[in-house]
Amino acid sequence: NVRATGHNYEKYNNWETIAAWTADIAAQNANLVSRTQIGTTFQGRPIYLLKVGKSGSNKKAIFMDCGFHAREWISPAFCQWFVKEAVSTYGSDTLMTRLLNNLDFYILPVLNIDGYVYTWTSYRMWRKTRSTNSGSSCIGTDPNRNFNAGWCSVGASKKPCDDTYCGSAPESEKETKALADFIRKNLSTIKAYLTIHSYSQMLLFPYSYTYSAPENYAELVKLASLYGTKYTFGSGASTIYLAAGGSDDWAYDQGIKYSFTFELRDTGRYGFALPESQIKPTSEETLKADKYIANYILSYAL
Ligand code: PAY
Ligand code: ZN
């Protein structure tokens, strides 16, 4: 049911609609979904987090965020899709039922809300946050260069006017700080970190800030290879480019050994302006990979 809760999952929704949806989906599925606020954006918007799963004790958790980069509209669309699928197939889909009974999913539908709003109101191709920079009239920091993982050493800019500006310090942005604080607080339960971007059709894992391979590289390759039929996979550095300060590398170095960056459709024909007709097929293929990874975590992660 595409319009569960009266929400349209096959359209790109503005922030106001997504914010209202987070309240509705929690209210209408109180047995499975609850909403909290983990922080506030630079411009004062509430950063919502949904916890999805059947209540239980000692559950492992999977953290997934969407909307790091403002212009990557397919990303928040997928987070909404994921929650819809969870609540509408719980009890009928065997795997989803098993996952929700035994795991919690933390879903952050839009991290960089100020940037997302800006892409709706002013400039569709905006990437960064909307924070001011002292000593510059340029706006914004790249949230995916703002984490403390080889921070600003490579593939990131020290210039506030650039799209990959790393910020004045790690976690200088209220949005990245809120996310990092939540993960630090829940490190004992979070076993996997998934961050959803577009585009390129890739599944990336650590590291991006160095060509060194992480300790469980072979396992990550094996896990990613399910998805590899449609999506290219490999370490960030060797598959897309060297880029320091990313949330995936930071989460990995915090001890979350299953850390993935998804680059959703397409490979460049439409790029960030992916047509709405591709929300459903993109979400279906990504959901499949997510469920596979979650099932692996449930079975094998310590
Ligand atoms: O982990 O290596 C990583 C992150 C790579 C992404 C990044 O630059 O943060 C890749 C880009 C993204 O999704 O932001 C790819 C897109 C197409 C871009 O804007 O270059
Ligand atoms: Zn991105």
Image (tube, helix red, strand yellow):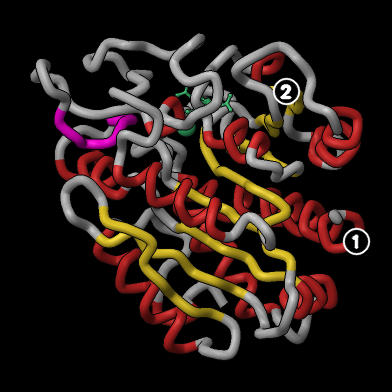
Q: Is residue 130 visible?
A: yes
Residue 283 horizontal/vertical position (percent): 61, 53
Residue 179 horizontal/vertical position (percent): 45, 50
Q: CA distance from mark 2 to mark 1?
A: 23 Å
- Secondary element under disc 1, as helix, strand or loop, is helix
Judge the density around disc 2: few (<14), some (14-19), many (≥20) Cα neighbours within 10 Å.
many
Residue at mark 2: 235
Residue at mark 1: 299
> Would residue 14 appear left or right of 210 to someone viewing this image?
left
Q: Tell me: is circle 2 under 8 Å from ligand 1.
A: no
Position above or below: 84 against 129: below
Image quadrant assignment for residue 22: bottom left
Position above or below: 295 against 165: below
Position above or below: 5 against 107: below
> Would residue 227 appear left or right of 8 to someone viewing this image?
right
Judge the density around disc 1: few (<14), some (14-19), many (≥20) Cα neighbours within 10 Å.
few
Image quadrant assignment for residue 159: top left
Query: Which mark is first along the chain, 1 or 2?
Result: 2
| Residue depicted at x 21% and y 45% | 42
Quadrant (top left/top right/bottom left/bottom right) for the N terminus: bottom right
* Foreground pick, 243 / 271: 243
Amino acid at the residue labelled 1: Ser
Residue 250 horizontal/vertical position (percent): 58, 34
Quadrant (top left/top right/bottom left/bottom right) for the C terminus: bottom right
Q: Tell me: is circle 1 under 8 Å from ligand 1.
A: no
Q: Is residue 125 visible?
A: no
Which secondary structure is most common in the magenta stretch? loop
Magenta segment range?
Answer: 125-132
| Residue depicted at x 71% and y 11% | 211
Position above or below: 281 against 80: above
Rendered image: mark on residue 243: none
Examine the structure image and report whether residue 218 is included in the region drawn in magenta: no
